[in-house]
């Protein structure tokens, strides 16, 4: 997926997407070795609701849009008519990127009109599992069940042999990139869990729980380190921005498997601490020992810069602080929020954030767009109100150029939903 976003820098949709094998923790020991996540206790998760359903899942809805609810200690944007603006962003994104063309009957897909490099094959108007994940997230929070079910149908039509979505399809639905990608997998699962509450049905919950089990045995190393896909247990590559700890706490509740809420969260927070640096500008990739770039003998192609993979990190970590008051999340957000809020960054003016930085804070990009600005705005919810409001207002203004592409427009929608109080953990509203 790094190659895909390198193309985007010049000018990412159902059951699976990108994965993130984070390395061996502070001790530097490798999480590789060809084994998947089978360690730890597995049958001690969460309470049970009525009829054997896990507490807080499969019930509680509907949650009509807008909700306009703050989570934990996080603040919402003070921009006027914020939820209306988020609705407009979703409507624009949907009309531009969601289509039934090239999808099975009754299904919908998210397209990327730009040229996409799928493992060496160039695809135009293709679909990636990551995009299906973003679409399902947005649709469940917008209470748009028709779109949600259409995207889910596309995912179900393009599963790999393990039961997760192949990561890249061409415009006719042919598999170009086989096997899953972990970031897309986890976004799809989270969307399904929230859908089980939004529409108070266990069918989405059952599907999500099955997928959680597939990820548990195919997308995790033994210590809980995330792999980049369901077929990469020997790959010495980590995308730390796939780490979404708020998700894993609910995965544990849904599946009854505490491995998610203990080993997976703790191990990957260690990896995050190892690569955070002074400013939170994590690399696009490292090896699984958290060695970055040319310093790694096994992942010399890993980009050491904060680019089109790493830019999602503030959003994913902010979810854990906002939903769960996790102190390790706050530590990270204070670094990256402090950087962009300060004079070394953009002094709180998010419109000046560009599409790339080195770990020491030097600009490596030149284009301001919502792939970078939106997630930083979400970090601003943890104590940087100027950063928060300026990022949201940039999303409202929605200038063209590089900001108009599929990837920044997708992140525009999900981050504006978060900043306006509409991207929520529904299990906590019951």
Image: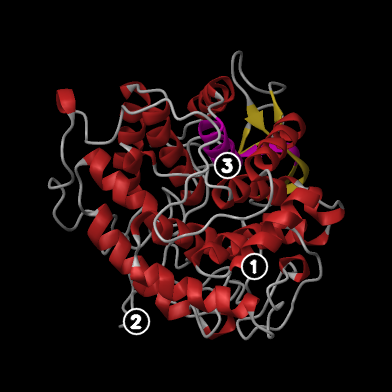
Q: Earlier in the sequence, mark 3 or mark 1?
A: 3
Q: Give SS at disc 2.
A: loop
Q: Is residue 347 magenta?
A: no
Pointer 3 with pointer 2, Cβ within 8 A: no
Q: Give SS at disc 1.
A: helix
Q: CA distance from mark 3 to mark 2?
A: 33 Å
The residue tagged 3 is 134
Whether residue 70 is situated above or below residue 168 in the rendered picture: below
What is the magenta range? 124-142
Q: Earlier in the sequence, mark 3 or mark 2?
A: 2
Where does the C terminus fall, quadrant-wise? top left
The residue tagged 2 is 28
Q: Which secondary structure is most common in the magenta stretch?
A: helix
Q: Which mark is residue 387?
A: 1
The nearer-to-camera label among 3 and 1 is 1
- Residue at position x 60%, y 55% from top? 77
Relative to 347, 326 lies left or right: left
């Amino acid at each position: 997926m790094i190659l895909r976003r390198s193309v985007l820098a010049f000018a990412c949709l159902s059951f699976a997407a990108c994965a993130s094998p984070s390395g061996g923790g502070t001790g530097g020991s490798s999480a590789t070795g060809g084994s998947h996540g089978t360690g730890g206790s597995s049958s001690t998760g969460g309470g049970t609701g009525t009829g054997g359903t896990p507490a807080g899942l499969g019930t509680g809805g509907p949650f009509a849009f807008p909700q306009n609810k703050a989570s934990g200690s996080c603040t919402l944007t003070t921009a006027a008519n914020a939820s209306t603006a988020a609705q407009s962003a979703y409507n624009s994104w949907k009309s531009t990127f969601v289509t039934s063309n090239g999808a099975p009957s009754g299904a919908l897909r998210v397209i990327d009109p730009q040229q996409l490099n799928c493992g060496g094959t160039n695809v135009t108007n293709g679909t990636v599992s990551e995009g299906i994940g973003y679409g399902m997230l947005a649709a469940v929070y917008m209470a748009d069940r028709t779109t949600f079910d259409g995207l889910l149908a596309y995912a179900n039509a393009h599963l790999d042999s393990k039961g997760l979505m192949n990561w890249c399809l061409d415009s006719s639905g042919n598999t170009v990139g086989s096997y899953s990608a972990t970031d897309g997998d986890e976004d799809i699962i989270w969307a399904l869990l929230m859908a089980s509450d939004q529409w108070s049905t266990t069918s989405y919950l059952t599907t999500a729980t099955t997928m959680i089990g597939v990820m548990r045995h195919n997308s995790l190393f033994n210590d809980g380190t995330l792999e980049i896909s369901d077929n990469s247990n020997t790959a010495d590559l980590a995308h730390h921005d796939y780490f979404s700890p708020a998700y894993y706490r609910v995965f544990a509740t849904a599946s009854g498997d505490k491995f998610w809420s203990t080993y997976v969260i703790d191990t990957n927070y260690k990896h995050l601490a190892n690569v955070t640096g002074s400013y939170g500008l994590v690399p696009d990739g490292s090896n699984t020992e958290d060695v970055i770039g040319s310093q790694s003998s096994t992942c010399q192609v890993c980009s050491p810069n904060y680019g089109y993979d790493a830019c999602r990190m503030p959003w994913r970590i902010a979810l854990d602080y906002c939903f769960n008051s996790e102190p390790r999340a706050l530590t990270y957000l204070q670094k990256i929020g402090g950087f962009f809020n300060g004079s070394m960054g953009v002094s709180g003016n998010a419109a000046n954030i560009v599409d790339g930085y080195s770990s020491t804070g030097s600009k490596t990009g030149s284009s301001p767009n919502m792939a970078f600005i939106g997630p930083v705005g979400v970090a601003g919810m943890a104590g940087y109100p100027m950063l928060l409001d300026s990022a949201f207002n940039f999303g409202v203004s929605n200038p063209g150029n590089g900001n108009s592409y599929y990837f920044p427009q997708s992140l525009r929608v999900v981050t504006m939903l978060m900043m306006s109080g509409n991207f929520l953990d529904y299990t906590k509203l019951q």
